[in-house]
Amino acid sequence: MRQSHALIAGAGIGGLTAALCLARQGWRISLFEQAPVLEEVGAGLQLSPNASAILRGLGVLPHLEHAALRPQELVLRRARDGASLIRLPLHEAEHLWGAPYLLAHRADLQRALLETLALHENISLRLGSTVAGFASGADGVRIVVKHGQIKSTFEGDCLIGADGVHSLVRGRLLEASQPLPQTKRELCKRTAWRALVPAELASTEMLKPRTNLWLGPDAHLVHYPLRQGTVVNVVAVIKTRPSTDSTQTFWAGIGDPAELAQSFTTWAEPARALLAAAPQWRTHPLLDYPPFPTWCAGRVALLGDAAHPMVPFLAQGAAQAIEDAAMLGHVLAEPLTGTQTIETALVTYQKQRYARASKVQAASRRQATIYHLKGPAALARDTVLRFSNPERTLAGYGWLYQVQNYPQDELT
Ligand SMILES: Cc1cc2nc3c(=O)[nH]c(=O)nc-3n(C[C@H](O)[C@H](O)[C@H](O)COP(=O)(O)OP(=O)(O)OC[C@H]3O[C@@H](n4cnc5c(N)ncnc54)[C@H](O)[C@@H]3O)c2cc1C
């Protein structure tokens, strides 16, 4: 039997995981990444059990765990004095949902995925290769790939657009399927500022194995240690200044610390000290889209941020990309049976994933409003948090952290 061949645009967390999920189902994979090298971009990622279970099933966790940290708790704090509002026992995650809650550097996760990829002969990764167009027909998909000035074409049985929030594949696919006025409603109300603070510049309190989430008016701050406590990952989210260019590429912006400090003048000293210790800030405008009307057409499907970009207030963008990849591998398991075709399998993939990803998108957006409350509304939020039961509050995230829809044998 001829081996099916998947073309994947983008070797981010979503594209790499999709390659692994399809390879284990017997597919041959050609993965195209526009970047000439997969470098140390990004910063920390929180990997909740719904994602870590899938990574474990793919054999990625052994390549990651030495570089990842298991947080004991998530502490929510009040901005003005740092008072703890609630402490959620994240160390319970494995007991509650069967897989660990992990903190990892994005580059470490990418490296762990690449190391696992290297064990598969049926995956080829082409760097410096930008997918510039595609045509999908009844028998397959043809893509145009640019390497500098040189253009080549490749053919496969399907194309997965895992090419991120500014996805070319999505642009072409939606153009081809139906007009989409609501994509114009993309919003950029907030900007994330990210930095890694070396341990020697951070207080010992900041190096404890916990995720800290500070809530303030129109802003919030997240920090946690990474890489065996050698650095502290810091993310500060503030309102977008009018000058911010929402078209800038992922991680590309360099932030002015004085501009950031203006948003934190009323915050407790430990928070301001941590911000002041950051050697460099990268800015990332947070784009907020409504769900797109479709993720697939014919033999082409979207995955990860290309399919459902979301604001990072539930720390779920990468996790949802990983869930997409698992479902894609599941529906495209070879051989397709009965009347199933690649086209119908991709429709099933969308059906299985669309409602959940849209729900996470909406919940992330709601969380943004809650985090950034001010005045009496913030006081009410803080009072509710202080009197909430930590175990029950954490258990309330079961809908998100519980792995759904995948056969257990793919998760062991
Ligand atoms: C501040 C912040 C904090 C976050 N924290 C978390 C967190 O804690 N947990 C979590 O789960 N998620 C988090 N996320 C979200 C997460 O980073 C993203 O959702 C995730 O990386 C998306 O993965 P992806 O593979 O879909 O897209 P990307 O990571 O954007 O990868 C897309 C890849 O495609 C490549 N590409 C683009 N166009 C082309 C083309 N035409 N041809 C070939 N290659 C192309 C790009 O170079 C890139 O490598 C956070 C995001 C932000 C901004």
Image (cartoon, rainbow, N blue to C red):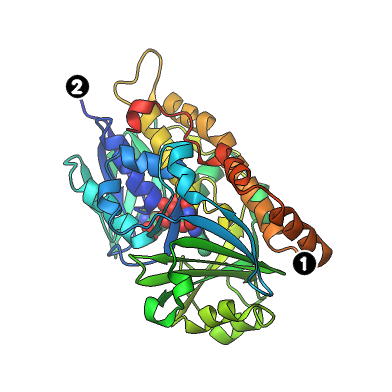
CA separation in Å, label 2 and label 1: 62 Å
* Left or right: 247 as drawn, with respect to 121: right
Residue 65 coordinates in the image, percent (x, y): 30, 53
Give, as a three-letter code, the residue at label 1. Answer: Lys
Q: Name the disc covering residue 307, or none.
A: none
Residue at 67 percent of width and 49 percent of height: 182
Residue 272 coordinates in the image, percent (x, y): 58, 81
Q: Determine crowd level at label 1: few under 14, some 14-19, many 20+ residues with C-alpha closer than 10 A.
A: some
Front-most of residues 31 and 22: 22
Ligand 1 image-quadrant field = bottom left
Q: Is residue 9 above or below residue 261?
A: above
**Helix, strand or loop for disc 2:** loop
Give the residue number, with chain letter if any, for mark 2. 1
Where is residue 324, by image quadrant? top left
Give, as a three-letter code, the residue at label 2. Answer: Met
Q: Residue furthest bottom?
A: 258
- Label 2 with label 1: CB-CB less than 8 Å: no
* Left or right: 198 as drawn, with respect to 254: left
Give the residue number, with chain letter if any, for mark 1. 374
Q: Determine crowd level at label 2: few under 14, some 14-19, many 20+ residues with C-alpha closer than 10 A.
A: few
Residue at 52 percent of width and 34 percent of height: 353
Where is residue 34, by image quadrant? bottom left
Q: Is residue 295 above or below residue 13?
A: above
Q: Quadrant of the C terminus?
A: top left
Residue 33 appears in the rendering: no
**Helix, strand or loop for disc 1:** loop
Of tags 2 and 1, the one toward the viewer is 1
Which callout, 2 or 1, points at the residue further toward the start of the chain?
Answer: 2
Q: Quadrant of the N terminus?
A: top left
Q: Residue furthest right?
A: 376
Residue 235 appears in the rendering: yes
Residue 237 coordinates in the image, percent (x, y): 60, 68
